[in-house]
Amino acid sequence: HQVLRVIPQSDEELQKVQELQDLEHLQLDFWLAPRGLGLPVDIRVPFPSLQAVKAHLEAAGVSYSIMIEDVQALLDEEQTEMLRSSRQLPRTTDTFNYEAYHTIDEIYDFMDMLVAENPNLVSKLEIGRSTENRPLYVLKFSTGGTNRPAVWIDTGIHSREWVTQASGVWFAKQIVQDHANNRGVASILETMDIFLEIITNPDGFAFTQTKNRLWRKTRSKHSGSICVGVDPNRNWDAGFGDAGASNNPCTETYHGPYPNSEPEVKSIVDFVKSHGNIKAFVSIHSYSQLLLYPYGYTDTPVPDQQELHELSAKAVAALSSLYGTKYKYGSIITTIYRASGTTVDWTYDQGIKYSFTFELRDTGRYGFLLPAKQILPTAEETWLALKVIMEHARDNMY
Amino acid sequence: SLAMELPPSHFPAARAAAVAVGYLRYLRGGPGRGLELREVRRARRQDIDDVGHKYYLELELEDVLDKDRTVNCTAEVLYHLGSKSSAPDVQVTVQGELRSTEEADKEFYNRIRSLEKELVAENIPDSHGNVPPELEPIHLLAWVASGYVIWQNSTENTKFHLAQVKHVKQVKRSDEDLQFDYVLLLHEMVSQEVLPWEVAVLWHPRRGARVSRCHGPGAGN
């Protein structure tokens, strides 16, 4: 295979390059996607498609250079890995492998198994559909009551943050086990419900598994742009469009054309509003090892700053107690960066006082590509922090 | 003006620390040594009129191949005014000795020199975070290369990490250096962009590493 670099100099050239993106059978891998005129596009072209791609470009007079010229074909380690782990399909959630990364279908199957095994505790809700029409599933854990005060947890809103979806799967099983053994969150479930959305951005997740492991955004196409996707953590109606997000569709923090333009976001907004009784909302990301509370869009501290700060300290202490993992905590804007249109700024402004964002392991050694053997310790330690938050919400009902 | 104390948990200290660590990796890293930040112990900032912002840091690091030991260092990072044009000035002082990598370096050097075909590899780590053990030195050398890129391209508004080695190819040389041409994906935290950088690194067990060529993904020629 070869890696070609194209620098489109005109709209016609840009168009020609974009056309290549739609030709699935060529199996092209864009290391650097088209962003605009004069900006490089890097395309990894498998050997069988080389002639076709070069012909396509040459016929249109688009010049390209060969960035990498490789003679040998390389084994695709990760494809083999995925095949290996899916060869033996787990029959129950007890035989499911929590120490590996899974495909969307494996996680959907897991959810169905969990519900089937625990019909009195767990149910699966479809709160909407993604841009590419994938279902948006939320697991509801409830021991009864009607519209009990609830905790919401989401993972995978940014698709490349794989340790989060993997942790979400583990959390689901943990809730069930705690309930069965009358320990841990069993006491919380006596008076509260837990909602868990494990694959919050399924289109992005699918893309990370097939095309680009480091894809972050949704996969929506808004008219007038060659670029795909909106940052689902800049698309909420809290300081929407202010500093801390981008209005350029070709960037990773593009906020979208308007708030809630993304069905992945709108479905949660609609759910939260119609539920009306969510008391704690936790949105989980990676990486950096941080526990964050609002605001991201403004310097003004939240009215509940002191309580959230103290609660964060407790939650982080619990997390660290397990494996010594060090976390920092604080408001989004002071701890990490200014960010507008974020999830927890919106949920906080809706009146959900205990609104938190986690950034899980690690601090950059592996970053998004966290080794699978760290899934379990990450999920276990994070769970301790989540319990602190849930218990505090239960004991400080408002 | 006086240096003001910064909360170590806030981002300005973290960003300056990342620059210092990048610089230190470039200077002292190698196929047998990867230095990682454990904690920012203390940070101060001084605004120098007509010059820029200078950060004074006390850092706790570890060698990823010798995690039980603590490496303490102090660093100064000066971001120049109008910083888009020049790299920050960095000074780092490591307290005590770093663990010797002489044997590991020699072993790596001889192994690569004795390869019949030039080494080529992709996606380090792979999607699942795996790094085959024989490629770990190549991964750590990529940290050296990315350390250079991070040092040269950081501002107070950026925080870079190496996301992945997209591609690496050994280039056989007639002199005694090893040469590796990398395509590195760097993740920038504030913009969240992941962009490719082409970096050619020369390395020798006694002389250490130097970047001989470095090309970013900016606007085309």
Image (tube, coloured by chain):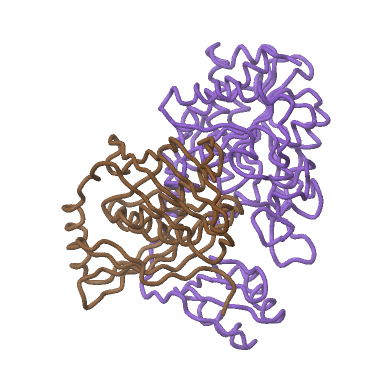
Chain colours: A purple, B brown
Residue B12: image location, x then y, percent: 55, 44
**Snapshot quadrant of residue B27:** bottom left
Seen in the picture, residue A78 relative to A305 is either above or below; the reply is below
Tell me if I can see residue B148 in this picture.
Answer: yes
Residue A173 relative to residue B138: left or right: right
**Snapshot quadrant of residue B193:** bottom right
Q: Nearer the viewer, residue A144 or A313?
A: A313
Residue A228 relative to residue A7: left or right: right
Looking at the image, which residue is at 65% across and 81% down? A9
Tell me if I can see residue A112 in this picture.
Answer: no
Residue sticking out furthest to the right: A274
Residue B7 relative to residue B166: left or right: right
Q: Nearer the viewer, residue B73 or A389?
A: B73
Residue A85: image location, x then y, percent: 44, 44
**Snapshot quadrant of residue A201:** top right
Looking at the image, which residue is at 65% across and 52% down? A217
Residue A75 relative to residue A345: left or right: left
Viewport quadrant of the C terminus of chain A = top right
Seen in the picture, residue B52 relative to B17 is either above or below; the reply is below
Residue B61: image location, x then y, percent: 36, 41
Residue A333: image location, x then y, percent: 65, 40
Viewport quadrant of the N terminus of chain A = bottom left
Looking at the image, which residue is at 67% across and 12% down? A395
Seen in the picture, residue A244 relative to B8 is either above or below; the reply is below
Residue sticking out furthest to the front: B1
For the image shown, how many numbered marks are present on the structure? 0
Q: Nearer the viewer, residue B54 or A308?
A: B54
